[in-house]
Amino acid sequence: MKNDINLIELLDQAVGLVKVKEFDKAMSVYEAILEKDSMNSQALSHLSIIYLMKERYIEAIDMIHKSIKILKPIIADYQNLAIAYIALRDYENAINAYENIIKISPNNSETYKLLGNAQIEVADNIGALDSYRKAYELEPDKFESIYNFGSILATSLLHEDAIRYLREAQKIDPNHIECMNKIGRSLSAIGDTESAKVIYQKLMILAPDAVGPYTDYASCLFFEGKYDVAIKKVKEVLIKKPNNDVARTNLGLFYLFNKNFKDGWKYIDSRILLKNQIDVTKRYEMLNSFFELDVNKKELKANERIIILGDAGIGDVILGLSMLKEFQKKFKNLSAEVDYRLVDLCKRSFPHIEFYAVRENRHEMLIDYDLSLFDKGIYWGSLGKYLRQKISDFPKKEIKFLTPDKEKVNEICNKLKKDKDIICGISWKSSANEGRHKTALLEDLNPIFILKKTRFLDLQYEIKKEEGRTKLEKAKLIKEKNIKIEDYEDIDKFKDIDGLTALVSKCDIIVTCSNVTAHIAGALGKKTYLFVPFQRGKLWYWHDAEGTSIWYPSIKIFTAKSNGGWGEVFERIAYTIKQDLKL
């Protein structure tokens, strides 16, 4: 009985101390109570709040979890958990806390907003899109709800919808800098550079010290083909802020696009530091704790153990593979990480190099090798600074550096039943960030489909969200034009890159947009007819407007004459194929 009286007295004492804001003393009393009664609900609840105030987040989380074991949790418990987890940058557990709040109170806009914020931190853009949409539906007239929804639409590459919502937000706050900037970027992304430039010019006045409007304005000029002016604008930024990674990366890209490789390689490594700023895992910093990274310098030594690191998509890695044998002559103790879909193909093609599989799990790169084995690291997209300083450094004749699986090749040969007709492999879509500009409709290729003595083989891969669209396009082509595109159904062209490579190897010619298929075809030395957009979406390594690729001499490049359409590109390709193959 005496112990109960003591506890009651201590609880009264603690409450009194809280009322007069003597939190340190109250904390000691509550801790004393828990020594007597480790599951005292009042002490657990109140102490967790004090721990939060004192930024003792791990202890606060422990108190809350103990509390909700003995009492039915309320919204405040999960709110406090979320606050602690966010402070610890434990976004996965914060997300779980917000989801529990929503189960109790499903119509609170603020909770959906906070959930969306946490999902952004773990690169769950699909989840954030859903959360911000619900927050908007609950508060459709609130600036923050409209702005957040418009922003995630832009991040999800749904630029037309993003512009609509961001414009609505702008009506509420006409001079909101970030809102204007996001509208400008979405306008530029859909090819409306004139409207985007108007916004950037206004932003330069409203925020004269901000770098973004100047670099984005320069990018618009570049997309319009005004290279010299664009380069001048970025240089002006670097005079004021010489270490700005956005400006340095853009200048590097502009130089590389114009075949000024010597200057381009000096700046392009800044892309790694730029990516690190938004990378929730801070992979660059983690790697740098194991070995020195050759970024913004050129300091690799012949006797060092070097790992080549992934920093881009499969196509860019294949571009890097085109230099690998030369690179190994300089640096013999070499290993490389590649997308898991490339491992078998790379090991077969470069048997004297160790390749490690990399898998991406939402926002994290999963590896299966020991980082402590290496002295230095260099990224795939940076090999060129050691090997491609001028035009004369590029291959003079057609190259072939990928070796397809012989068994798969033979299997394909047996099933394709090749006759005297030319087999033309076709791929017309890209799922990359700039894919909308690189992609054509299948029916756009009609001038090619009327070529005589030619069979057409589908090489188009599909990502999950576009599944079935290729089939619909082919069905429409048969129905309306009586043109059949053959499909080799035994290969998943997205997951099975080794199989896709074998399939490409059995084509006589390739017609493709700028995607992985283009790189595979070039790496196999296949006669390839590549169509690329005028500017926006045209990658820097497809330099020539009309001519032969300096990276892959078997590829002929055909460029649209203006932004926003393909014009006569496919007529030009069809004519060239006729001339080359005497059809």
Image (tube, grey):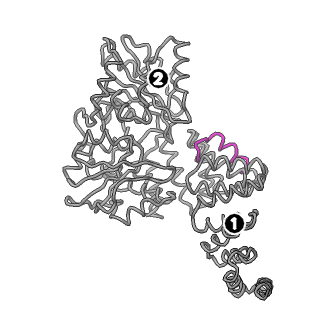
Q: Quadrant of the C terminus?
A: top left
Q: Amino acid at mark 1?
A: Lys
Q: Is residue 376 left or right of residue 28?
A: left
Reply yes or no: does residue 238 show up in magenta.
Answer: no
Counting residues from the N terminus, which is met first, the one under dot 1 or under dot 2? 1
Mark closer to the observer (1, 2): 1
Q: In the picture shown, does residue 244 fall above or below 228?
A: below
Could you classify mark 2 by the number of other residues whose Cα lies within 10 Å: few (under 14), some (14-19), or many (20 or more)?
some
Q: Is residue 435 left or right of residue 490?
A: right
Q: Amino acid at mark 2?
A: Glu
Q: Residue 571: image x %, image y %? A: 43, 20
Q: Residue 27: image x %, image y %? A: 69, 83
Q: Main secondary structure of the magenta part?
A: helix
Residue at 29% x, 59% y: name it.
298
Q: Pointer 2: what residue? A: 568
**Most extreme residue toward the front, as rendered?**
1
Q: Pointer 1: what residue? A: 69
Residue at 64% x, 70% y: name it.
61
Q: Residue 439: image x %, image y %? A: 50, 31
Observer-nearest of 168 and 55:
55
Observer-nearest of 89 and 288:
89
Q: Quadrant of residue 177?
A: bottom right
Q: Secondary structure at mark 1?
A: helix
Q: Quadrant of the N terminus?
A: bottom right
Q: Is residue 38 left or right of residue 260?
A: right
Reply yes or no: does residue 166 show up in magenta.
Answer: yes
Q: Secondary structure at mark 2?
A: loop
How far apart, in angstroms, are the residues tagged by discs 1 and 2?
A: 70 Å
Which stretch is magenta?
A: 155-170
Could you classify mark 1 by the number of other residues whose Cα lies within 10 Å: few (under 14), some (14-19), or many (20 or more)?
few
